[in-house]
């Protein structure tokens, strides 16, 4: 019994150390923090993929409020983080080991440029937020531009709330979100499939009719004459009421 509990605790401990679980928990932390923005007059889009030429931009979170559009890139890194807006690479230090990674501000800039292509009517500064989860510590980060913020999980909501100027009506907020949803790759794939299904149905219908088969019930079609002239009808009439010109 005691051994069982011990093994369970050990398994949970190992799971919490795995990068996937950590990444997941970090991501959940940001999502949870975003709830602090409330639900009214705000749209929070998670995991949006947009096509950019032959590449895709994967955006972790887009927050659309009456105060603007915020694009959030999340990083779940441990250790101390050092970086400057201008440098191509940032540094992560864990004890004595150092690792370099791509400047996340540059990465998020690419995401924002892609998003802008899909929002031609709303060109205005889109706010860039790079959010490090609480796994790590921001040690020295140099940012000089307005509308670029590098924070930890707890800092995301305060940054968004610091924008107090009203930019969009409530309706606009939802319109913008819908527009992004329409273009997000998953939404688009679903739409394409939907169109493909309709086209396939129409093709099948045309094929049936060219072979003299009722597309509705599969019985032979027959020529009939009615008050308004001749037409094609189903031989199963009145059970099937299919007609064609
Ligand atoms: Zn029929």
Image (cartoon, rainbow, N blue to C red):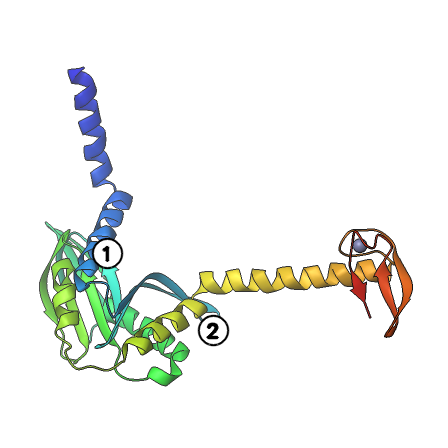
Query: Is residue 71 shown above or below 217?
Result: below
Tell me the element at label 1: helix
Q: Quadrant of ligand 1?
A: bottom right
Q: Residue at x 90, y 64 (%)?
A: 224
Seen in the picture, residue 47 relative to 124 is either above or below; the reply is above
Looking at the figure, which quarter contains the N terminus?
top left
Place of residue 40 in the rendered image (x, y in percent of width and height, measured from the top left) = 23, 67
Residue 111 picture quarter: bottom left
Which mark identifies residue 119?
A: none
Residue 190 percent across, percent down from the top left: 51, 60
The disc label shown at residue 31, or none: 1
- Numbered circles on residues, count: 2
Question: Tag 2: Cα neighbours inside 10 Å, few (<14), some, or many (≥20)?
Answer: few
**x 23%, y 46%: residue:** 22
Q: Are marks 1 and 2 in contact (CB under 8 Å)?
A: no
Q: Is residue 103 visible?
A: no
How packed mark 1 is, by other alpha carbons closer than 10 Å (few <14, some 14-19, many 20 or more), is some
Q: Quadrant for the C terminus, please.
A: bottom right
Picture coordinates of residue 240 (x, y %)?
78, 54
The reply, left or right, for residue 136 in relation to residue 11 is left
Residue furthest to the top in view is 1
- Which of discs 1 and 2 lies nearer the camera? The answer is 1
Q: CA distance from mark 1 to mark 2?
A: 29 Å
Q: Is residue 118 left or right of residue 156?
A: right
The residue singled out by tag 2 in the image is: 53
| Image-quadrant location for residue 114 | bottom left
């Amino acid at each position: 019994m005691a051994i069982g509990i011990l093994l369970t605790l050990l398994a949970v401990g190992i799971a919490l150390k795995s990068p996937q679980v950590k990444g997941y928990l970090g991501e959940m932390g940001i999502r949870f923090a975003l709830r602090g923005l409330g639900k009214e007059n705000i749209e929070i889009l998670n995991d949006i993929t947009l096509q950019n030429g032959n590449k895709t931009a994967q955006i972790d979170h887009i927050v659309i409020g009456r105060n603007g559009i915020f694009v959030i890139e999340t990083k779940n890194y441990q250790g101390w983080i050092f970086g400057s807006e201008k440098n191509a690479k940032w540094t992560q230090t864990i004890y004595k080991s150092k690792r370099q990674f791509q400047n996340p501000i540059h990465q998020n800039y690419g995401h924002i440029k892609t998003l802008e292509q899909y929002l031609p009517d709303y060109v205005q500064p889109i706010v860039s937020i790079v959010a490090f989860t609480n796994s790590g510590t921001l040690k020295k980060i140099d940012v000089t531009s307005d509308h670029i913020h590098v924070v930890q999980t707890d800092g995301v909501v305060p940054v968004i709330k610091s924008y107090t100027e009203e930019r969009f009506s409530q309706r606009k907020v939802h319109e913008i979100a819908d527009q992004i949803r329409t273009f997000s790759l998953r939404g688009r794939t679903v739409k394409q499939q939907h169109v493909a299904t309709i086209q396939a149905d129409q093709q099948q219908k045309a094929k049936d009719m060219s072979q003299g088969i009722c597309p509705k019930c599969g019985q032979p079609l027959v020529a009939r004459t009615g008050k308004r002239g001749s037409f094609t009808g189903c031989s199963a009439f009145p059970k099937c009421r299919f007609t064609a010109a």
